[in-house]
Amino acid sequence: MTIETTAAQTAAPATGETVTMTYSEAVRDAMRIAMAKDPAVFIMGEDVGTYGGAFGVTGELINEIGPDRVRDTTISELGIMGAGVGAAMTGMRPIVEIQFSDFTAQAMDQIANQAAKIHFMLGGAVNVPMVIRAPGGSGTGAAAQHSQSLEAWFVHIPGLKVVMPATADDAKGLLLSAIDDPNPVMVIEHKLLYKTSGEVRTGDIRTPLGVAAVPREGKDLTIIATGVEVSRALEAAEILAADGIEATVVDPRTLKPLDSDTILRTVKATGRVLLVQEAVRTLGFMSEVSAIISESDAFGYLRAPIKRLAGLDIPIPYAPKLERASVPQVEDIVAAATDLVRKW
Amino acid sequence: MNTQIVANRELAAASLATMWKIRRFEEAVEDLYGRGLMHGTMHLSIGQEAVPTGACLALNKDDYITSTHRGHGHCIAKGADMERMMAELLAKETGYCRGRGGSMHIADTATGNLGANGIVAGGVPIATGAALSAKMRGTKQVAVSFHGDGAMGEGAWHEGVVLAAMWQLPVVFLCENNLYGMSMSSEKAFNLDQLSDRAKGYGIPGVTVDGNDVQAVYDATKEAVDRARAGGGPTFIEAKTYRWRGHSKSDKNLYRTRDEIDEWRGKDPIPLFEAQALAAGGLTQADIDAVRDNVRTELRSAVQRANAAPDATADDLLSAVYAR
């Protein structure tokens, strides 16, 4: 397991500096850093090698690290996931890439019945330190089997941790934390975010799991959003500000474990809450957030009913107009927020 | 030429002891369950003892196995402690899983056992992963995936074998063909003369052996393990045997005849092995009696100590879900 010089250099400690890079590059940077530091870390998945990944995320890592640790597989999601579990139980730290999060359905036994349960079920005798990276979300015209937002499935399985990075810096920092973690961590990236750019801290940095981000603070309402809806919420907040409505925006970043403290604190401060998710509405992650708020003392601070804005309860359709109409857009957030503040 | 187990006093005694341990452990489990002293469910492998016994004899302590819902035999043959196993089944804090797993989830990492599994074929790709890990770490360890004939209808079996063959991993896929996947006869289920015919389609060697003959299972496993350790990739082994008891407690044996069960009881691997060992001079009748009596005493003591242990506690359930 030789380590290329370029990779070793990138693994320099955090410098406090930032550099502009895309979300996709940030994910790659995290994997490069982790692999340079620890020979147990390796990537495994369909077309992650020479092809560079279905979304180009692994890129040229195979040339830097070699085919042993940037490992192309057959089209066998269940087998890949099982191999990841077995490797993780025996001293390796696999990063399993699933091309589209929809394909986790093919691998669900190994995710839900094996990876998630082994530590508990075996009385703590074994850990499964595995990362599963899977792009989710709609917006690419790939229709119903390539566009779902399935995070609630994974949050519903005790034993898994679930993160949804919304910025390039979090894509890097959360992934490095996920790789460190002794548990299976599902990292749901968003395919629309891969090409977006942001300032990313250089070197071996971390974004801790279980800590929400509050990228904007305002007095009138709290918008809690995940994944691609975070950038939509921030864009909506700009528009709302021009209309005199000041919004706080909360990005949980980690869905499990969830930073309920930050959610409740910001809800108490504004007294109005708008929950925004791309996933279908019924029993979505924001249903849980709504319940957490309702069951807490923050309930007494509410000046308006909790409002959920979510994807329609339908498979994602192909036609661009239909696809766009299926999930919350910036204008939907603006309208719902305005309604909440003006009516209540 | 492999070691002739039946002619080697030490190996013959150890093998006979392993088979008796499995038999006595499961008889005790059946008895405790029948008397209402054990709850849950369990799957007994009585009649199949020669397979894990012969296979694990070909393994080093640090080699890996993955097992099945019918896993007591694999666990014991790989070296697990019967008291901790029994404590687990009796829902005790001292059990292998602290009462969280039960019969279907016993693992013993100290002896390389990565766990029984409640999902048919669930352990197959996990064994592939353990073998991948051994190869990447350069340890020369080998993984054995014990599975039943029923597993060969699962997609996980296919995908686990495909990856192992592509990467030429040090893994042995060992099918205990006990002739039924619950009630489905393997003869009906698979359009093959023998299940090892399937290996060719995966580009790996395949062999069928008498699963009631410790020596035959050992020989096939030893050859496969030696090849795997030398970098020669995976092997598939079909060991033909028979489950005397029902699939689980709900089984009314409607899918097979009493004659068939009796016929296989006549092929009991334990007396078969004893006769071979006597004939080959590996064991005397006195040795055989001593092995049987010692195991009975050991098992009785394991049950007593397990029974006396504290019940599993619910105090820290929530904090036990995630590793720290």
Image (cartoon, grey):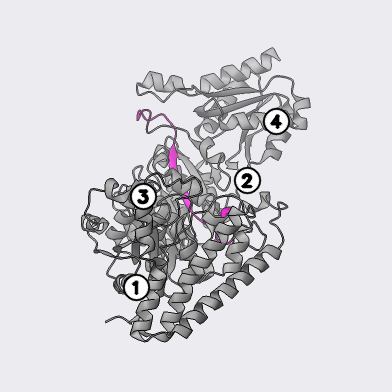
Label 3 vs label 1: CA separation?
30 Å
- Disc 1 to disc 2, how far (Cα)? 50 Å
Question: What secondary structure do most residues of the magenta stretch adopt?
Answer: loop
In the picture, measured across the screen, residue B240 lies left or right of residue B75, that is left
User: Cα distance, mark 2 to mark 4?
Assistant: 17 Å
Q: Is residue A4 left or right of residue A219?
A: left
Tag 3, which secondary structure? loop
The amino acid type, in three-letter code, at marker 3 is Thr
**Disc 3 to disc 4, C-alpha distance:** 61 Å
Does label 3 or label 1 sit earlier along the sequence?
Answer: 1
Q: Give the foreground label among 3 and 1.
A: 3
Q: Rounded to the nearest whole Å, what is the CA distance between mark 4 and mark 1?
A: 61 Å
Q: Secondary structure at mark 2?
A: loop
Residue A142 shown in magenta: yes
- Residue at mark 1: B218
As drawn, the label of residue A293 is 4
The picture places residue A7, in percent across and down from the top left corner, at: 42, 61
- At a point 27% along the width and 69% down the height, the residue shown is B232
Of the two numbered discs 2 and 4 in the rendering, the one whose residue sits closer to the viewer: 4
Residues in magenta, as a range: A120-145
Q: Label 4 is placed on what type of residue?
A: Ile
